[in-house]
Structures are given as C-alpha cells and as structure tokens.
Amino acid sequence: MNTITLCILVALGMFLCLPQCYIGPGIGGGVFAIIIGFILSIFLALFAIIWYPLRRLFKKKKPQVTKPKQEELNKDTTESI
C-alpha cells in the first residue's frame, strides 16, 4: 500500500510544479484568439445543424402551379374556332 501511495504522490508532484516562464502579449493574444475561434466554430456548427432543419420544417410550402398540357391547349383553341 505504501508503494502505491508513494507512486501517486510522485505523479501528482510532477504535475503540481508551476511553470516559470513568461508568455508575451503576442503569444497570449494568439492563444486567446485560437481558443475563442475554436469555441465559436463549435457553436456555429451546432447552430447550423439545428437551425437549418427547423427552418425547412417551418417554411410554408407554396402551392404548386401545374402547367396545362399541350392537348388541353389544343382543345381550347379548336373549340373557340
């Protein structure tokens, strides 16, 4: 039990050390822009996946106008003569 506890404490200790580095405004701004762009692209994808099917569902269908057949047009012209 002591070796398992020691291994866990050593592993956690490796991740708990604070980085001693400086991130300049250029790198920080770039990282910030990447994070914001990634989050916005996820929201845009979800919006597109949800919005377009809903828009098609609620879109009013126009009544279809059928064109008269050529035979019907010929009947009308021969009857009027």
Image (spheres, rainbow, N blue to C red):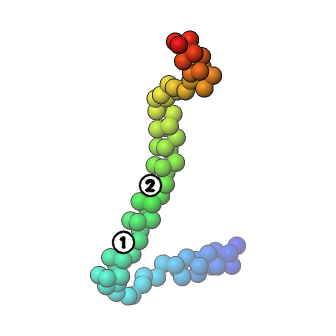
The kind of residue tagged 2 is: Leu
> In the visual, does 56 lie left or right of 11?
left
Q: Secondary structure at mark 2?
A: helix
Q: Quadrant of the N terminus?
A: bottom right
Q: Is residue 2 visible?
A: no
From the top left corner, tell me how far across and down residue 5 is, in percent. 64, 74
Pointer 1 residue: 32
- The disc placed on residue 44 is 2
The furthest residue to the left: 25
Q: Residue at x 46, y 82 (%)?
A: 17
Q: Residue at x 53, y 13 (%)?
A: 81
Label total for image: 2
From the top left corner, tell me how far across and down residue 10 is, in percent. 58, 81
Q: Residue at x 32, y 76 (%)?
A: 29
Q: Earlier in the sequence, mark 2 or mark 1?
A: 1
- Depth check: give the residue in front, 81 or 22: 81
